[in-house]
Structure formats: C-alpha cells, structure tokens
Amino acid sequence: MRIAIQNPFSGQSVAETELSKRFYQAALNLGWQAAEVYTAADIDHFQPDFVIALHNNSPKLAGFPTYGCMWNPLSFFEGTEKYVKHVLSYDGYLTSSFPVERWLHHILHHTPKQFFTVPFYTSCARNAYQVPNLENPRLIYLGSNWDMPRFQELFEQLDQQPYMEVYGNPEGWTHLQTAYKGALPYDGASVFQTLNQVGVGLCLHREEHTRYELPSMRIFEIVASGAIAICGEHPFIRKAFGDSVLYLDLGLSVEAQVQQISEYMEWIRLHPQEAIALSQKAHAIFLEHYTLEKLLLDIIPHHQRLIQTKGFIQSIEITAKPQVEFIIKIASDSIETSQKTFESLARQSYGNIGVIAIAESVEKAAQLCQLYESKFPIQIVESSANEFKSTQIWKGLNAVQAEYFAVLDQIAIHPNHAARLVSLLEKSTAGVAYSGALIAAAEDTSELIQFHPFDLDRLLLFEPLITLSAAIGRRSLLDTLLSYDPLLNEWVDLSILLYLAQQTQFLFSYEATCELLYPPQQLEQSVFQQSRDWSTEASRLRVMFWHQEFAPGKSIQTVHQAHLAQQYLQHQLERSHAELRRIEEQLQVQLQDAQAVIAAMESSKFWKLRTAWFKLKRAIGLPTNDEPS
C-alpha cells in the first residue's frame, strides 16, 4: 500500500506535523510506503492508493480516494461553509466518536454520495512496553496552549509544584515562571522518550472535545510511552482505558485539583510497582485496539469496496455500459491544455467513452488525436476560428450519438468522474449530473469551487453555480436545443446550462471529480445592469430567455426582481443598524459627559461645603429634608 498523508500545515510546529511522522512510522512498520503531501502535485507525483487528510483546512486535492480525519469538535467548523464543503469533498471519513459519525449521517444521508466511516484516532505507532522512570516521578504536560485561558489558573498553581514540567511552543506558556521547560522536536520520537523518563503524563481536554467525545493525542502518547496517565474525565478515556489510568475531578476547585494531583504523585512515588501495573494495563489496551497500524489496516476492507463502488477502478461487468461522448474544442493555441484533458479521459475507469474533437486546425488536431485513438473512438469536427464559439460547440452537440454527453473546456477530470456521474443518472430521473471542481490557488494549494447543490434561483441570477465541464447530461435533452445556436462568443456554457435547466432536474454528486486548468469566467458586474449595452455578450442572455419560465412563476426577470427587493431590504436593514450604532455612540458620549460633570461638581469647593453642612445638620439633629437622595 502507498498512502499520502495530506498535511495543510506542513513544516509548521503543530500537532498535524507530529501526527504525520507517526503515520509514516506506522506505515513503514506495515511494509507500506508513505509520504507527507501538501499540494495536488505532491499527490499526483506520489501516486498513492489513498490519501489521508489530517485536517479539514484543505479539501480533497486530487483524483485519488481521500479519507478525512474527523477528530476536531464540530463547533470548530460547522458554522463555516468553506470547511463543511471540504468535509463533504472527502470520499470516506475516519471518525473518532459517535457524535461526529452521527453528524456525518445527518448531513449526508439524503445525498447520493457514497462513503464509509471507520473508527480512527490521533494515536501512535506500535511499540514495545518500556517501564517508566519512577525513581523521582515528575508530571509532564505537552501542548501548544494556543487557547491560553484553558486551564490557565490550574497551570499557574501547578507551576508552583516541584514535580511539574510543561513542554510546548513558548508563545503559549509565557505566564509560567518555573515549570515551562521548552519545546520538543516534532520528530515522532522525542515525545515518547521524554514521557517515559519523566514518568507521569497529564491529559486534559477542552470542553468541546469532551462534549463530542473526541480524545486528543495526549492519552495515546502517554500510554504508548509507558508513563502513568492522569486524565480529566472524558467519555472515551473512561470507556477505552477504564481503571488503567488515574482520573482528575475537574468539578473540584482549582486548589482541590492541585491537591488531588499532588496526592496521585505521592502515591506513584510510594507505590511504583502498582503504578507500573497500571501503565502496563493501559499499554496492553493500546496495543490491542488503538495502534496506528491496526487503525490503518481497518481502513483497507472499506477502501477496497469504495474504489469499486465509486469507480476508481474499472469494474468487470457483463452488461454493456451506455456511451458518454465528450466534446472538446481544440484551439490552435491551446494544444497543451487540450492534451491534459485527453490524458484525463485516457485514465477514466468508465469503459465506454468517445470524443468529439472540434478543431480549427484539423492537421494539429489529428496529431493529438492519434495519441489516443487506441484508448477511445475520436470524431474530428472541423470549425473555423472566425465562427462564434457557440457555433463551434453546437457543431459538436449536433455530432453526439451516444446516450450521454459532456462538454469539456480547459479541464481535467478525475478517473472516476464519468463512472460516478453516469451511475447517478442511471439511478435517477434527473437529466444532468454534475460534480464540484478544484482549481489551483495561491501558494501551490488547491481551492474547492462550485461545490453546491443545484439552486435554480442562483443560476437565473447568472451566478457561477456550476461548471458545465463538470456535468454529464442525457442526449435526449439536445433534441430541442440543437437548432438554437445562440450566436455567442462568451457565456456559451451559461447559455447551455440555462437551456438544460428549462427541461430537466440537475443532480449534484457531492464529489469533487474535476480540476479546472484556468479560472472560470465571471461577470464583473450584473448582467442586468448591462442589459442596454448591446456591445457585451453577457447582456444578451437576458433577452434570449425573456420572461421564459424555468419553473411555475419563475423566470430570469421574476428572480431578478425578487433579488433586487431582497437587496433593498438588506440595504435598509444595514442603514438601520448603522443608525442605531450612531445613536448608541452618541448616548455613550452624552453619558460620559454627564458623568464628567457630576464628578467635577462633587470635587468642587461648593459641593464639599454642601456635603459638610448636611453632615453637621445630622450631627446636631437638625432636619435634612432638602438633602439630595
């Protein structure tokens, strides 16, 4: 097996860097090959059997099965659409708790996405048990402490205890005077050596990790090192390790928690053999259930089923598959880009595809097509560079004979793209199935774009909701389309999508199975605002579909009017909020001015004399009815 470890924080001093080292070691122990990867190019170069994504900061990046590690609390990301989409782009999920698995079930059970979940944890590679050093036991806590308020008071009091040692990034521990000992290398080994020499490890969790029953790295590295574990109460630790670890009652006051820890440290010092027996028991549980080697092996049966069901490998079927014909425009100045598209077609697992090549230069196109004639049938359709772009595409559409068609423009599709989308269409009445897309972004990373369930309103607002090149449609939809060349040089893809949306439903695969080779064209301003500027291609789209219904009572005009009304209300709401903020600021200034006046009065000689006068009246028993309350 070859596994790629996708680390979006490669080279940084973070937990994922340490985990990557541990994955690498576990893979070597299994006789596998492993590599840490950061970009799609890294993955393509390594050619793994599958990819493990360590964090949902990055989506699936390349055309290989990608399994996302779900070991972060849901509250960390579920309110951010970008990161939810990253999660949805994965092919399978390595889950660390039932609440997270349940969340995946809720968000995916109504979609056509095929996926698996399998238990997985931030664990360590298998190792032999080593007796901890308990001659002078000390307590170690490892962590970057990126959220400093967590347990701050506890650590400030532990800082005064002679047994306490803290390791991690220095920025997180500036409030400690004596216990902080520096940072350990992220090398996959130093943590275990240090824990074993110190003897006792402290394992604490954020409230969110406890609520979602997600264990951190701490429990696994402590028990793997042979050290005795002192743990805050946590559902997973209680269930998995039982009485093989010591528990800290976080419901106590901080002073009482420190006292409890000190009592544990004294017990370990006085009863080293009993403490070692605990660590041996915990290590045995780790070896039996939680080593990375075991967890990785548990993925394999699910992986082998998934690569067949999702079309990553060509399946052996007796019944013939319906053909998909891909229309590709080969421009004389973009042969290299066209070749990337052809290469991706040659890697398709779907066994029945054809190509309709629209060529401005038949000679150049023929040279390219000869390289792939043994892979699939190719039909060359001659066009002229002087023709409208839509006319060139319509020539290709008129040449389609297969049951399904697609139009590919400056795109590379993943090996299972055709298999996945045809499978969805075969099981559905929808006329078009489509996937999300990836595109190269800054710093050699990839960005997930146009990853949305179908939204007719957004399409009618001409938002870049779908990439036509990411879609496969039924040939029967072309019957009413072929005689209506829109005579456009731009926005041809959008016009085709609008034509199709008038006739059929669209089905989103919840996968990202294609990569755009260039950024998609976008409208710089509203098409509707350009409607009278007939020099622009985009302005013509509104007239082409003038008051035509896409659904009962829904046309480009009605959706646009509703959108303008919504924008107006939003603008009014923002103005109201701004006015309220202005009034609040004014009142705050007035309050401060009034308080300053009162303070000045109270410090004046007159006010002091007046106060003294009332005190004197009270002292001699005179009435003070005129004294302010």
Image (spheres, helix red, strand yellow):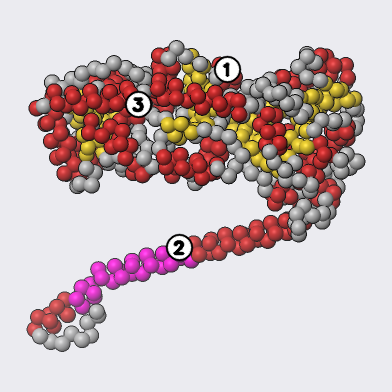
Residue mark closest to the camera, 1 vs 2 = 1
Q: Is residue 567 above or below residue 260?
A: below
Q: Which residue is mark 2?
A: 585
Amino acid marked by disc 3: His
On the image, the x and y values in percent for residue 436 come to 64, 36
The residue sitting at 46% across, 31% down in the picture is 118
Magenta span? 582-611
Amino acid marked by disc 2: Glu
Amino acid marked by disc 1: Gln
Distance, label 3 to label 2, CA atoms, is 60 Å
For residue 47, the mark is 1
The answer to whether 26 appears left or right of 512 in the picture is: left
Q: Is residue 341 magenta?
A: no
Question: Could you say which quadrant of the image residue 420 lies in?
Answer: top right
Residue mark closest to the camera, 3 vs 1 = 3
Label located before the other in sequence (1 or 2): 1
Distance, label 1 to label 2, CA atoms, is 60 Å
On the image, the x and y values in percent for residue 195 come to 25, 23
The majority secondary structure of the magenta stretch comes to helix
Question: Could you say which quadrant of the image residue 601 lies in?
Answer: bottom left
Q: Which residue is mark 3?
A: 289
Q: Nearer the viewer, residue 303 or 181?
A: 303
Q: Is residue 583 magenta?
A: yes
The residue sitting at 41% across, 64% down in the picture is 588
On the image, the x and y values in percent for residue 619 come to 9, 80
